Image: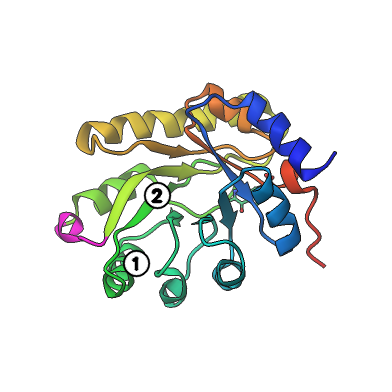
Amino acid sequence: MSIKDNLTAIKDKLPKEVTLVAVSKTKPNEAILEAYEAGQRVFGENKIQEMTQKWETLPKDIKWHMIGHVQRNKVKYMAEFVSLIHGVDSFRLLLEINKQAKKYDRVIPCLLQMHIAEEETKFGLDKTELYAVINSHDFMALENIKVVGLMGMATFTKDERQIRKEFASLKSIFDDLKQKLPDIPVLSMGMSGDYAIAIEEGSTMVRIGSSIFGARNYS
Ligand SMILES: *Cc1c(COP(=O)(O)O)cnc(C)c1O
């Protein structure tokens, strides 16, 4: 199957209101252009340098999402163009994004990343930390960022019950947060292996890489 066929097959399974982020990390510009020519405009990368190089060379109407872990000292490289940062997991990072966005007179949309998986290795906030960020004295004063929702990754497992339970917990945190911040439309959850479950559990944005572009080769 071609990239175009893969995209079509996935889009057929997505409800209209769910946004598809095509995760193009490690993939060359030619593969991205193939998806672009099939109509895809939203792409996700997990390395700031790689995303910046792609932004410089590919069509300017592409929306670039940073889906990976963000180091504060690299925010400056993407502040000019990034359209959504999924992996915000500290107030200090939010402050830095705000500072860099200001230089470009931008408001950068951000998602707060929640830790929902059993694995220790996945980044993210727990519920207490989430509310510490939202309730912090300075939060409302940050004029160059906008928190538009939450992001999370389920445990990497074949156990569907486990995955569903984790996505459901994120959805419940999301609904809870909406009481305080009504204007948060985005719940980013679901990847190639688990997006069908994520959508059943209330995802509004899925991040799909290998099912579109094929397996990644990290060598
Ligand atoms: C790589 C990655 C994805 C996409 O993974 P696939 O299994 O290839 O669909 C989604 N989200 C994040 C945060 C990733 O790093």
> What is the x, y in percent for residue 89?
40, 57
Q: Is mark 2 within 8 Å of ligand 1?
A: no
Residue 184 rendering spot, x and y as whole percentages: 31, 39
Q: Amino acid at mark 2?
A: Leu
Q: Assess whether mark 2 and mark 1 are in contact (beta carbons under 8 angstroms).
A: no
Question: What residue is rendered at 52% in x and 62% in y?
Answer: 60
Tell which of 180 and 102 is nearer to you. Answer: 102
One can see residue 163 in this view? yes
Residue where numbered disc 1 is placed: 97
* Residue 145 position within the rendered picture, expressed as x and y whole percent measured from the top left: 29, 58
Q: Whole-Å distance between the Cαs marked 1 and 2?
A: 12 Å
Q: Which residue position holds label 2? A: 111
Q: Residue at x 74, y 56 (%)?
A: 31
Say which amino acid is labelled 1: Ile
* Magenta segment, prevailing SS (helix, strand or loop): loop
Q: Is residue 107 left or right of residue 190?
A: left
Asked whether residue 73 is drawn in magenta, I would say no
Instruction: Determine the secondary structure under disc 1.
Output: helix
On screen, residue 179 above or below 97:
above
Total marks drawn? 2
Task: Judge: label 1 CB < 8 Å from ligand 1.
Answer: no
Question: Quick one: quadrant of the C terminus?
Answer: bottom right
Work out whether residue 118 can be spotted: no
- State which region is magenta: 137-144
Vertical side of 182 occupied by 82: above or below: below
Precedes in sequence: disc 1 or disc 2? 1
Q: Is label 2 in a helix, a strand or a loop?
A: strand
Whether residue 142 is in magenta: the answer is yes
User: Where does the image place residue 190, in percent across and percent down from the top left?
Assistant: 58, 37
Q: Categorize mark 1 by other alpha carbons within 10 Å: few (<14), some (14-19), many (20+).
A: many
Q: Residue at x 68, y 48 (%)?
A: 37
Instruction: Please tell me whether residue 105 is drawn above or below residue 87 in the rendered image.
Output: below
